Amino acid sequence: MIVELVGHSPDAPRLVGGVYGKHSAIGQTPRPHDIYLEALYAVEEDENGIRDITQRVDPQRGIYLSATQIARIDLVPEAGATLKS
């Protein structure tokens, strides 16, 4: 997934990529929740606003994101995954 943090702009990028898997956590009620992603990835955004997860951060680690800092979450398929309609 790609998480856009509050205050993101082209001049001040605030994007986090990560894997939401079996070692991740998020609440399940219909209100904002903190998120823990089990693997942290770098994200790049081009001049057209197209975002791409580039590489896993080394050393490998997860990241905790406070609900108050999350502006938007984009779910992206796993590399090599096939989307079915």
Image: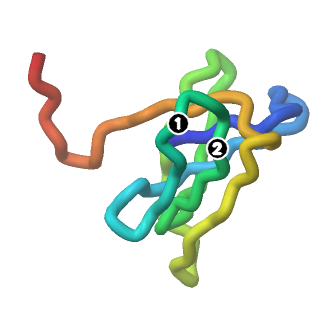
Splitting the image into 4 quarters, where does residue 73 fall? top right
Quarter of the figure with the C terminus: top left
Q: Residue 30 in the image: state x and y as whole percent.
A: 55, 28
- Give the residue type at disc 2: His
Q: Are marks 1 and 2 in contact (CB under 8 Å)?
A: yes
Nearer to us in this view, 59 or 36: 36
Question: Does residue 74 appear left or right of residue 47 in this picture?
Answer: left
Q: Residue 78 in the image: state x and y as whole percent.
A: 28, 47
- Give the residue type at disc 1: Thr
The colour scheme is rainbow
Q: Residues within 10 Å of mark 2 (few under 14, many from 20)?
A: some
Question: Does residue 77 appear left or right of residue 24 in this picture?
Answer: left
Mark 1–mark 2 Cα distance, whole angstroms, equals 8 Å
Nearest to viewer (mark 1 / mark 2)? 1
Q: Residue furthest front?
A: 29
Residue at which label 2 appears: 33
Local secondary structure at mark 2 = loop
Q: Residue 48 in the image: state x and y as whole percent.
A: 63, 16
Q: Residue at x 83, y 34 (%)?
A: 6
Nearer to us in this view, 33 or 21: 33
Give the numbered dot on residue 60: none
Q: Residue at x 45, y 63 (%)?
A: 24
Nearer to us in this view, 20 or 50: 20
Give the numbered dot on residue 29: 1
Q: Is residue 22 above or below residue 70?
A: below
Local secondary structure at mark 1 = loop
Q: Is residue 4 above or below residue 84?
A: below
Splitting the image into 4 quarters, where does residue 77 fall? top left
